[in-house]
Image (spheres, rainbow, N blue to C red):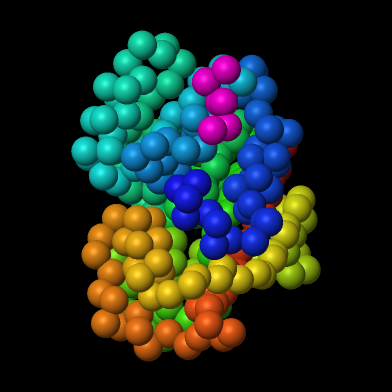
Amino acid sequence: MDAIRRYEPNIDYNKYFFDVLSSYANKNLEVLDLGTGKDAKVISKGSLLKLCKYVAGIDINSDTIKNLQTKYKNFGNVKFTMADSTKKTSLSSASFGVITALFSPFSLKEVKRLLKPNGTFIAMFALPGDHSELRQVLPELFETKTWVTLAATNGKDLFAVFENSELKEKEIYPVFNLGFKYKWFFPNTTEVQKFYSHILDRDVPISQLKKLKQINKEIPITRKIGLVVLKKLPY
C-alpha cells in the first residue's frame, strides 16, 4: 500500500485512530476488535498483544479467521472467532474494557452489551459523502453486501449521539468526536482502478471509471471520515 499512498495528501487517518487507541490500551484491559480483517490491522499495528491483557478479534469471513488462528497460534493472549459484528454474538456480556471498529460494521446495541462498565468504544467510519465521485459512477460498490464500510450509515447514526440532549440517561455516552474531509488525487483512471481493486479485493470496471471528472488533469476522490470515542456508564 505504500506505493498507493502517494495519491493521498499528508493526512493519515489511521494515525488519528491509533493515537486514540494507544491512550486507552493498557495491560489491565481486554480488547475486542470488530471486523478485524485478514491482516488484523488494529491488533497488529496497535501492538495490542504487548499492550493488553487479552485481545480478541471477530470477523464474518471464516477463511480470515482460520488464517489468523494459524498466524497467531503461538500467542496465548489472543483469540479469533468467526462472528457477525452487526448482530448479537456468543461473546460474554461486559467482558471487554475497549472495543474497536476501524471501518468495520457494528451493532451499537451489541457494543454496549459487550463493554464493561466504564468501558470505551473507539470507531472510525465513512461519513455520508465519502467516495462521492466513485458513488456516482459505480453505485453498486456501495451496497452493504459488497463493502459495508463504504455505506456510511453507521457514521451518520453515531455522530447523532453527540447531538442528543438526553445523553445522561443513556447507557453509553460520547467523550470525543472528530470529522474531517480531504481529497485523493489520481493521475488517470488506470491508477484509480488499481487502487480500488486493491482495497476492495475485487475487479473494478475501468469502463465506468472513465466517467469520473478530471480537474487539472487529475481525478479527485473525496474522503469524509469520522472518529468517535464513546464510554459506557460506570454502573
Task: Tell me residue 166's x, y (percent).
Answer: 75, 65
23 in the magenta segment? no
What's the magenta bit mostly, secondary-structure-wise? helix
Count of numbered circles in the view = 0
Q: Please, is residue 1 above or below residue 25 in the view? A: below
87 horizontally vs 168: left or right: left
206 horizontally vs 123: left or right: left
Residue 168 visible in this rendered orientation of the protein: yes
x 41%, y 41%: residue: 36
Residue 160 visible in this rendered orientation of the protein: no
Q: Please, is residue 109 above or below residue 197 in the view? A: above
47 in the magenta segment? yes
Task: Tell me residue 20's x, y (percent).
Answer: 70, 41
x 28%, y 38%: residue: 64
205 horizontally vs 48: left or right: left
Taking depth in this image into account, of 158 and 201 the one nearest to the observer is: 201
* Quadrant, the C terminus: top right
Instruction: Examine the image and state in which quarter residue 73 appears.
Output: top left
Task: Tell me residue 198's x, y (percent).
Answer: 35, 56
Task: Tell me residue 217's x, y (percent).
Answer: 53, 82
Instruction: Examine the image and state in which quarter residue 24 appears.
Output: top right
x 40%, y 69%: residue: 192
Taking depth in this image into account, of 202 and 48 the one nearest to the observer is: 202
x 50%, y 46%: residue: 2
Q: Which range of residues does the magenta coloring cover?
A: 45-50
Q: Please, is residue 72 above or below residue 181 in the view? A: above
161 horizontally vs 219: left or right: right
Instruction: Examine the image and state in which quarter residue 72 appears.
Output: top left
